Amino acid sequence: MSTSMGYRFAVNVTPKAGILDPQGRAVEGSLPHLGVSGVHDVRVGRRVELTVEAASEADARITVERLAGELLSNPMIEAYAVELLGSTSSTTSESTETGAGVAAG
Amino acid sequence: MTRIGVVVFPGSNRDIDAINALRVAGAEPVTLWHESPDLAGVDGIVLPGGFAYGDYLRAGVIARFSPVMRAVAAFAAEGGHVLGICNGFQVLTEAGLLPGALLRNRSLRFVSRQIAIAPERLDSPFTRAIDARRPLRMPVAHGEGCYYAEPAALDALEASGGVLFRYVHLDGAPAGGEEDRANPNGSLRAIAGVTNAAGNVAGLMPHPETAVEAVLGSDDGLGIVRSLVDSAAERAAGRRTTVTVGAR
């Protein structure tokens, strides 16, 4: 009997180094209004969380890497990092966070 | 009559303007629905402005994976003429059919106003009907139009004649960087439009299709639309000749 698991990932997409990030610059520009100093290099990105059904974590990672590179980020202007958040058995609705997954994050 | 397809995505909103412009330019517009890979035998294609699929994730990226875009990519690979305007330009860069990327405007503001661009060359399929290298007035309306590519890629693009249009002042002086109002989005090297290496796919952020009649405030955009129609007509005529010769 084959078992399928649900692997929960986060894909963190950020502007590549050197790419102008007007959102980050606007956030940075607002800091004096908060009376905050000594904060710089603010970069604003995007985080996408998704669950991949797969037979193994390795298979799930292949899928999520493909999505991250082809759809979720534009490699010309953005970098991404994949983070495993946890896994659940797809046969039950109960969520069981794996310690290894959390540690990987 | 030359038949030019206008692709309609959910969220396209300048498709009617493109259809009008094609009629003014003497072509027969054909609406192409995003879910169908059938291009209805058109001679050329316009990807119009708007917010395809809501521009979620990144402008143009989800449209890239639609059935019609696979057909458009195949059409372009065969040498067919494809013009992307505004959101259509964003779709073409996301699809890898045009070089570079369009980033959020440096001002972070949506810009909607009249600007001027000048063609870099008049020998391309998209500029051949423009009468002179003078500033062309037309509107921009976008939030993500800041043209970007890495410096080496920009150099290569310029060297190969890939830059088609640049933002300029009304007197023709080139627009500067982000502090210059003539460059509405802070595009690198004031690039407003580019073409691919083969020269049959082009995109620009400004809207020539809404500047095709004096009553619209400007008809400076008509030369661009007419160039596409002429190029597509010429290619179609060439193909018919080939077919006829082949049949004999």
Image (spheres, rainbow, N blue to C red):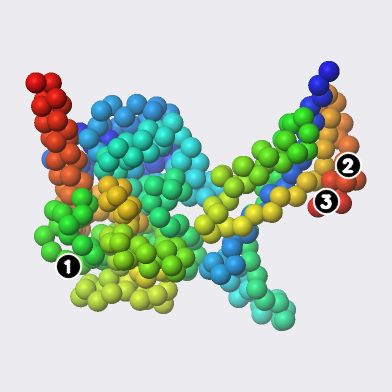
Residue carrying label 3: A104
Kindly tell me whether residue B213 is visible in this rendering: yes
Quadrant in which the C terminus of chain B appears: top left
Q: Which residue is mark 2?
A: A98
B176 w.r.t. B113: above or below: below
State the image coordinates of residue A20 (x, y, percent, origin top left): 53, 68
Q: Residues within 10 Å of mark 1 (few under 14, many from 20)?
A: some
Residue B184, visible in the rendered structure:
no
User: Which chain's residue wears label 2?
Assistant: A
Name the subunit of mark 3: A
Marked residue chain, label 1? B
Mark 3 or mark 1: which is in front?
A: 3
Q: Which mark is residue A94?
A: none
Q: Nearer the viewer, residue B183 or A19?
A: A19
**Mark pair 2, 1: CA separation:** 65 Å
Residue B170 spot, x, y in % from top left? 22, 72
Say if labels 3 and 1 share a chain.
no
Instruction: Kindly indicate the quadrant of the structure image that contains residue B8.
Output: top left
Q: Residue furthest right?
A: A99
> Is residue B28 or residue B91 the one in the foreground?
B91
